[in-house]
Amino acid sequence: MTETDEYDRIFAALKHPLRRQILLLLEEKGEASFTEIQKAVGVNGTGLLSYHLKELGTLVEQSERGKYDLSEIGRASMALFWKVEREKQASDSVIQNHLERIVGEIVFLFFIVGATFLAPLSADIYLSVQTVFSGSLITQIVLMFLASLLGMVFGAVLFLFYDRHYFSKNPRTNAVHSLLFAVGISLMSTYSAYISYQFEMVSANGSNFAFWFSILRAVSFLGITPIVAYATGGFLNRR
């Protein structure tokens, strides 16, 4: 038998589930009779088990008492098997950790976007209800404008820490990413404000003050966010 044939026999034995089961049994038990192997692997016919033992060839050896055990080649084969299994498990673990990291990034990002968008949305809904039932005072609009803008800026700061943790610690890069984040939030908040404005127009108390303040809020957010991101990122890098 050539060396290539020997390797082919080893890989064929490790690939076949029943033969691999026999090898694992002999590795664990150390020595087993034909009947013990037959019972352990759950083979009913003696002919089938005899065939597989024969196919294992030099991987197993039979003692004078008729019991089977791993040969030196068989032990080397099992060492190779466990090495491959460890590498496979390590690879699977790396893939799983990578997937968990991606899922964590997505969930965290959705949380930040939702929390940031909630500030202007809540303010717009409050002002719409006030306008429909009693009309909104300019002071209420200004206060809700400032409160919602502050909430949006806080969300942008959360996004900055997210961006620095997962992507880059460069202040300029953080500022660009934060500006893109601000554009997305501003578009969403402006659209929600427009919907609220349309809702207000069905009432006699409808006013466009709140809508124009929402435009001003979006523009202010677009201007403030990259500045805050760049300044905060630079400060954190100097620490």
Image (spheres, rainbow, N blue to C red):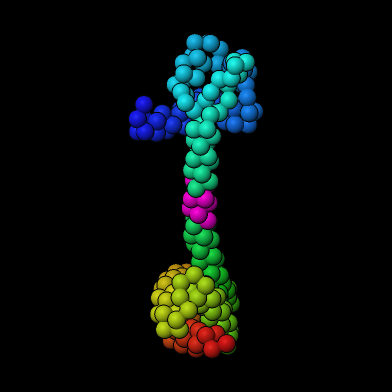
Query: Is residue 41 shown left or right of residue 91?
Result: right
Residue extent of the magenta highlight = 88-97
Magenta part, dominant SS: helix
Q: Is residue 211 above or below residue 111?
A: below
- Residue toward you, 21 or 143: 21
Q: Quick check: can you spot residue 61?
A: yes
Q: Quick check: can you spot residue 145?
A: no
Q: Is residue 13 magenta?
A: no
Residue 183 rendering spot, x and y as whole percentages: 41, 76
Residue at horizontal 44 percent and vertical 21 percent from the top: 55
Query: Is residue 54 shown left or right of residue 43?
Result: left
- Residue toward you, 97 or 130: 97
Residue at horizontal 40 percent and vertical 30 percent from the top: 6
Most extreme residue toward the front, as rendered? 64
Residue 50 rendering spot, x and y as whole percentages: 50, 14
Q: Is residue 82 above or below residue 106?
A: above
- Residue toward you, 22 or 209: 22
Q: Is residue 92 magenta?
A: yes
Residue at horizontal 46 percent and vertical 72 percent from the top: 167
Quarter-wise, where is residue 24 in the image?
Answer: top right
Residue 74 rendering spot, x and y as whole percentages: 51, 31
- Residue toward you, 145 or 97: 97
Q: Quadrant of the C terminus?
A: bottom right
Q: Quadrant of the N terminus?
A: top left
